[in-house]
Image (tube, helix red, strand yellow):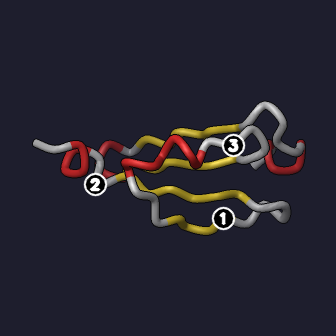
Amino acid sequence: MSLDDEYQDFRCYEVDDSSEMAELDVDLDKIQELFSSEGVYLFVRYDIRRIFIWKGPKSPVRKRFI
């Protein structure tokens, strides 16, 4: 099983300044580039009903309180 097969059910959303979310098409090989210190991202795994949140240390307060 490849890494892409194992994580194909993840969905990634970026939270913007107005607390709206936009789905991102993320290449798993380049996912580390996504994690910026100013960003807030949601990773949703629907099959196991889990939500993972990345809140960058320099992300605006408004984005952190989703």
Instruction: List the residue tagged with mark 2.
Output: 8
Which of label 3 and label 2 is nearer to you? Answer: 3
Q: Are marks 3 and 2 in contact (CB under 8 Å)?
A: no
Instruction: List the residue tagged with mark 3.
Output: 36
Q: CA distance from mark 3 to mark 1?
A: 16 Å
Residue at x-position 75% and y-position 49%: 66
Q: Residues within 10 Å of mark 1 (few under 14, many from 20)?
A: some
Q: Earlier in the sequence, mark 2 or mark 1?
A: 2
Instruction: Name the spot of residue 51 as percent of width and height, x first.
Output: 50, 43
Instruction: List the residue tagged with mark 1.
Output: 21
Which of label 3 and label 1 is nearer to you? Answer: 3
Give above or below for 21 relative to 62.
below
Q: Earlier in the sequence, mark 3 or mark 2?
A: 2
Give above or below for 27 relative to 52.
below
Looking at the rendered image, the quarter that the N terminus falls into is top left
Q: Is residue 5 left or right of residue 25?
A: left
Instruction: Name the spot of residue 29 as percent of width and height, x first.
Output: 37, 48
Instruction: Name the spot of residue 2 as percent of width and height, x first.
Output: 16, 44
Q: Is residue 65 left or right of residue 12?
A: right
Q: Is residue 35 left or right of residue 26?
A: right
Which of label 2 and label 1 is nearer to you? Answer: 2
Residue at x-position 84% and y-position 65%: 18
Q: Earlier in the sequence, mark 3 or mark 1?
A: 1
Q: Nearer the viewer, residue 34 or 21?
A: 34
Residue at x-position 70% and y-position 57%: 15
Local SS, label 2: loop
Q: In the picture, residue 55 is in which quadrant?
A: top right
Residue at x-position 38% and y-position 50%: 28
